[in-house]
Amino acid sequence: MAQRQLAWVINDRGCWIVSSHKPEKHGYVRIRRGRKATLAHRMMFEKMNGPIPPGMIIMHICDTPACVNPAHLRLGTQAENVKDRDQKGRLVAKGHPGIRNPWARLDDDKIRIIRRDAQRGIAQRVLAVRFGVNQGQISKIVTGRAWRHIRAVAVQRVREMVGESMLVQ
Ligand SMILES: [Zn+2]
């Protein structure tokens, strides 16, 4: 596979959503640099802050796995991560709307990505699989019958942040 630059889309919450590489099922973006595989947000953290200490993990303060904005990343421990998830689990138990609803997982960022990819000719059924919703929902998003409030996406490549070392596969 040819090397390409890591590129992202910046949303109105300041998340840098990777657009050059497809996220995996869990939402994180896996990249390869030479023989080593890593996750895009970990690579970005290390680029800005130096190596991640052994046993530490990188947490997203924005809860957006595909985000690589260094300002949204922080070091944490596995225990902290579990605690964080438990707290969110309790929110669900208290009846906060929609957190468990797959449709609700289509947040503004994903809606933008769906519209952009549809414009680039990616089939709606492919998008439906990727985002875990049915094709009818994708169709509504693409045609603007749903999520009408989301503005068109602004694609930005932040070149000064993307040196040679950011070339990934
Ligand atoms: Zn973010």
Image (cartoon, rainbow, N blue to C red):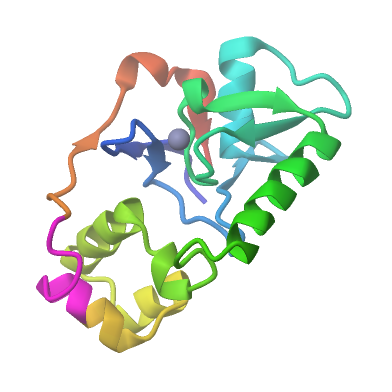
Q: Nearer the viewer, residue 61 or 20?
A: 61
Horizontal relation, residue 52 to residue 113: left or right: right
Q: Nearer the viewer, residue 82 or 48?
A: 82
Horizontal relation, residue 106 to residue 11: left or right: right
Residue at left 45%, top 79%?
Answer: 129
Residue at left 28%, top 71%?
Answer: 122
What secondary structure do most residues of the magenta stretch adopt? loop
Magenta-drawn segment: 140-149
Pinpoint residue 112: horizontal percent, then vertical percent. Answer: 25, 55
Instruction: Residue lying at the far right in this picture: please name it.
Output: 55
Residue at left 40%, top 73%?
Answer: 103
Q: How many marks?
A: 0
Residue 54 position by quadrant: top right
The answer to if 68 sits in the magenta stretch is no
Residue 80 position by quadrant: top right
Residue at left 50%, top 45%?
Answer: 64
Horizontal relation, residue 50 to residue 129: left or right: right
Pinpoint residue 53: horizontal percent, then vertical percent. Answer: 82, 19
Pinpoint residue 113: horizontal percent, then vertical percent. Answer: 30, 57
Vertical arrangement, residue 83 with respect to residue 132, above or below: above
Pinpoint residue 121: horizontal percent, then vertical percent. Answer: 21, 70
Q: Nearer the viewer, residue 49 or 32?
A: 49
Classify the position of ligand 1 by quadrant: top left, top right, bottom left or bottom right.
top left
Instruction: Residue lying at the far front in this picture: please name it.
Output: 94
Residue 135 position by quadrant: bottom left
